[in-house]
Image (cartoon, rainbow, N blue to C red):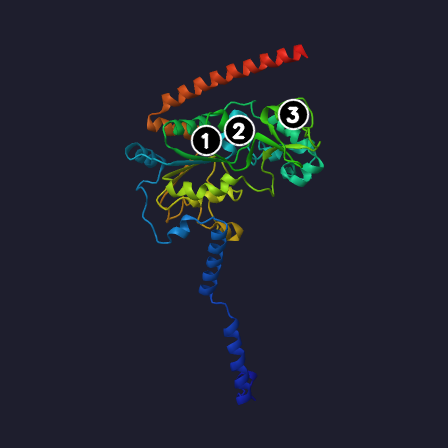
Amino acid sequence: MCDDNDKPTTSKETNKNDEENSQEKEYAKDPLEEDTTMEAMRKFFAQKLNLNTAKDEDDCPARKVIEDLTFDGLCEHWKTMGFKNIITMVGAGISTSAGIPDFRSPGSGLYDNLQKYNLPHPSSIFESSYFERNPQPFFALAKELYPGSFNPTPSHYFVRLLHEKGLLLRHYTQNIDTLERVAGIPDEKLVEAHGTFYTNHCIRCNTEYSMEWMKNEIFSDKLPTCTSCKSVVKPDIVFFGENLPDKFYTLPGKDFNKCDLLIIMGTSLEVQPFASLVDRAGQRCLRLLINRTKVGGNDHGGLAYWFFGGPGLMFDSPNNTRDIVYVGDCDDGVWALVQALGWTDELNYLIKTEHERLAKENATQRQQKKKDEQTE
């Protein structure tokens, strides 16, 4: 007696097996074909959204941009060879030494300290739908964080110094505190990706209001209300689900093709599409991260890789050709840079004179406000 495996196969069974094998081959996924299709889809969406990356420009392996991919190696290269078109890319970490909390640091971050507003969840305070129902928590927070209550940090003035030396191509910021403007970085150099308190608009009729008008409303504990239609007036900061400013979509394609050094400071690189900017830089552009932790790697999966592509920052990869990291506070990294470049005295002088100017302006504004109150 033979078992099932030893039974002779009839011609009818053979034909049936051949058909099944044929179907299996027809529907089996070729891994190489699948990878090619996925990459084609990623490139299609990247092109449609004008988000092409250096990876799309040149898929060939590249040699190191500089031999010594360390902070000291970068500083030495800067002193001997120089850079001409520097882009700075920053987040809340450059403002923390001014007294403004960042968003995600455990314990001290903004999201960990919003319980007093009784929000459904911390990010609700920056959601349009929640703001329209209940704008008061946002304006209470805005009063705490409002521009004019803080001075720019050494990191802000470092960017200003780059501008004064003719090296700053563009400054991309996630911050809404306007400290870049206070530090004297001109509007044409700024891309405020997540908006700003600098301008304000009615959420219904779009009437524009000045920063000074909004500040008076907020510090008078009034709900900023449009004089035309009586709807709420909102600062032009980008809430979740809203479009980023036009500059963010029009300038990167021009800027990052010229960039020879990208300096990234004080950001988690978790929020898209801002985080994708790191991969807009060409293959021969050095990228320096100054941050408390290493961030910016891409896991080559999920929507971020599909739509924004690129390998992200590659400090610890054997294939790293251009990425350098300084682990520490932003201001410490900036001071280390300027010391290596011989710019310490220049930065100190800039900070001193600018802080004196701001102190005088603030004193004048306080005196004027006091006079106005007395005449009312």
Give me the C-alpha separation between circle 1 and circle 2: 18 Å
Name the residue beneath numbered marker 1: 330
Indicate which disc residue 15 carries.
none
Q: Residue at left 61%, top 14%?
A: 369
Indicate which disc residue 178 carries.
2
Q: Quadrant of residue 234?
A: top right
Q: Is residue 262 left or right of residue 130?
A: left
What's the residue type where badge 3 is placed?
Ile
Callout 3–callout 1 Cβ contact below 8 Å: no
Of labels 1 and 2, earlier in sequence is: 2
Indicate which disc residue 218 carries.
3
Q: Is residue 120 left or right of residue 282?
A: right
What's the residue type where badge 2 is placed?
Thr
Above/below status of 92 relative to 360: below
User: Residue 151 location in percent, x, y?
Assistant: 51, 22
| Residue 22 visible to an observer of this rendering | yes
Image quarter of the N terminus:
bottom right
Mark 1 or 2: the one toward you: 2
Q: Residue furthest front?
A: 228
Give me the C-alpha separation between circle 3 and circle 1: 30 Å
| Residue 300 visible to an observer of this rendering | no
